[in-house]
Amino acid sequence: MTVGGIAFDAMTAQQVITRVRADLVAGRGGHIVTPNVDIVRQVRQSPKFADQVSCGDLVVADGAPLVWASRLAGTRLPERVAGSDLIWDLSAAAADDERSIYVLGGTPGGERPTSVVAAERLADTFPGLDVAGACTPPMGFESNVAYLDELAEELVEVAPDIVFVGLGFPKQERIITRLAEGLPSAWFLGCGAAVDFVAGRRRRAPVWMQRSGLEWAHRLASEPRRLFVRYVVHDAPVAAGLLLRSGWHGLRHR
């Protein structure tokens, strides 16, 4: 199902979890990509960004406007599937199945690495969850070949079943492609700011704002200097255009 030029898997969060659990039992790994409106914008700007999305084994919509647009067009993605929710849901499933996770990413700085704090919170929330490791890389690490090699070697050594990578698009997708070479039976989730949310380094929007499609407004209010240009100048016109075109398409085909 194509929305905004991206081919999405029309799946609920529960279907994603079921797929991951079944594949892990069968020894198959994969990569979950969670595009939002900002990623749709980047994909439109450059084919290289489209390649970062198409590399996903599962591509699910992390953005209410994408779900709304699909419904206006008459194709209907079943629901928003956010990386910030999947990190919790997949950790719960991993605990039930006695599997392990690895947390990679988060904002550098603070007394303790963001990834470690997030991993500990997940382990506290889901007793029995096996945390294979955690790492918050320094800024610019993606250009350090030696650092990437060491990180890849560590992951192969600890062999997690699920790896949460919260580094932002498209960096996290490039890093996942690199790391997945050594872990063909593991599942990777590119989850953006989810590691920061779990660790409490950033506050996620209240549930009512998440459900009503206003999570972006909460994030904008929390970080106006960093997000104003992205959300208001760049993404808002893309979302509006997407909804208008989808509505027109739906009317023409009724």
Image: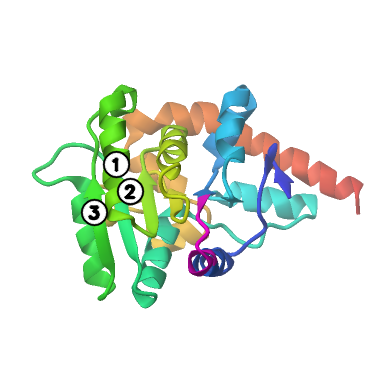
Q: Quick one: label 2 or label 3, which is nearer the N terminus?
A: 3
Mark 1 to mark 2 CA distance (whole Å): 5 Å
Q: Which mark is residue 153?
A: 1
Q: Which residues are magenta?
A: 23-31
Q: Residues within 10 Å of mark 3 (few under 14, many from 20)?
A: some
Residue of label 3? 133
Residues at circles 1 and 2 in contact by the CB criterion of under 8 Å: yes
Q: Which residue is mark 2?
A: 156
Q: In this rendering, does residue 191 appear at all?
A: yes
> Identity of the amino acid at label 3?
Gly
Dot 1 or dot 3: first in sequence order is 3
Report x, y in % for residue 32: 52, 51
Inspect the magenta stretch and tell me whether residue 240 lies in it: no
Which scheme is used to colour this image of the protein? Answer: rainbow
| Label 2 vs label 3, nearer the camera | 2
Q: Residue at x 46, y 57 (%)?
A: 210
Name the residue at 24% across, 67% down: 123
Q: CA distance from mark 1 to mark 3?
A: 13 Å
